[in-house]
Image (tube, rainbow, N blue to C red):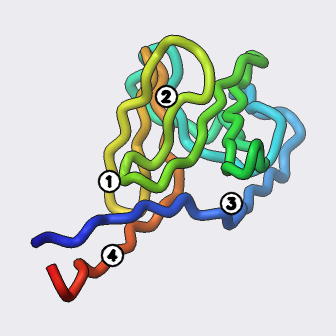
Amino acid sequence: MRGVAVLCIVGAALAGCSSGENQAAQVAEGGERISCALAGAGEFTQDCSVDRSQVDGKLTLVVRHPDGSFRRFTVVSDGRGVVVADGADQAEAVVQGDKLAVAVADDRYLFPATVKAKAADAGK
């Protein structure tokens, strides 16, 4: 019997510094920076931010876009990583190295993550 993989969203903040006051790209205000490709963009940028909070005992991630819009995700421990907390669109997630790649409609996000293998029960 194979073990079950458990995905953990890493909580360490990503540090970012800018020596110039004028930045070419608009960046969302908020907590930690994550890479995103919005509205079907081909390349990822560090223009999104994510805030973490506990809602009803579950970790909730609010990803803020540079235009002021946002998406809410709930972290789940069933191997999917995250699910959309509200809205009709579903999240598709796949682990890519040390990132959880999440796609919702035309938006894509890269969350820092680690995968931990859970040992299979010895008696089964």
Q: Is residue 28 above or below residue 49?
A: above
Where residue 114 appears, x then y in whole percent? Answer: 44, 67
Question: Considering only order in the chain, which callout, 2 or 3, is on the residue closer to the N terminus?
Answer: 3
Q: Residue furthest left?
A: 1
First reached walking from the N terminus: tag 1 or tag 3: 3
Decide which of 75, 42 is in the foreground and name it.
75
Labels 1, 4: front one:
4
Residue 43 occupies quadrant: top left
Residue occupying image coordinates x 38% and y 67%: 115
Q: Image check: 111 left or right of 66?
A: left
Label 1, on which residue? Answer: 96
Residue 68, horizontal then vertical, whole percent: 78, 18
Spatial distance from mark 2 to mark 4, Cα to Cα?
A: 32 Å
Side of 63 relative to 9 (left or right) = right
Label pair 2/4, CB-CB below 8 angstroms = no
Residue at 73% x, 51% y: name it: 57
Q: Nearer the viewer, mark 2 or mark 4?
A: 4
- The residue where tag 3 is placed is 14
State the residue at coordinates (77%, 33%): 23
In which quadrant is the C terminus drawn? bottom left
- Compute the Cα span from label 3 to label 2: 18 Å
User: CA gap, disc 4 to disc 3?
Assistant: 27 Å
| Residue position for label 4 | 118
Which is in the foreground here, disc 1 or disc 2? Answer: 1
The amino acid at mark 2 is Ala
Indicate whether 6 appears above or below 35.
Answer: below
**Residue 92 position within the rendered picture, expressed as x and y whole percent measured from the top left:** 36, 32
Residue named by callout 2: 37
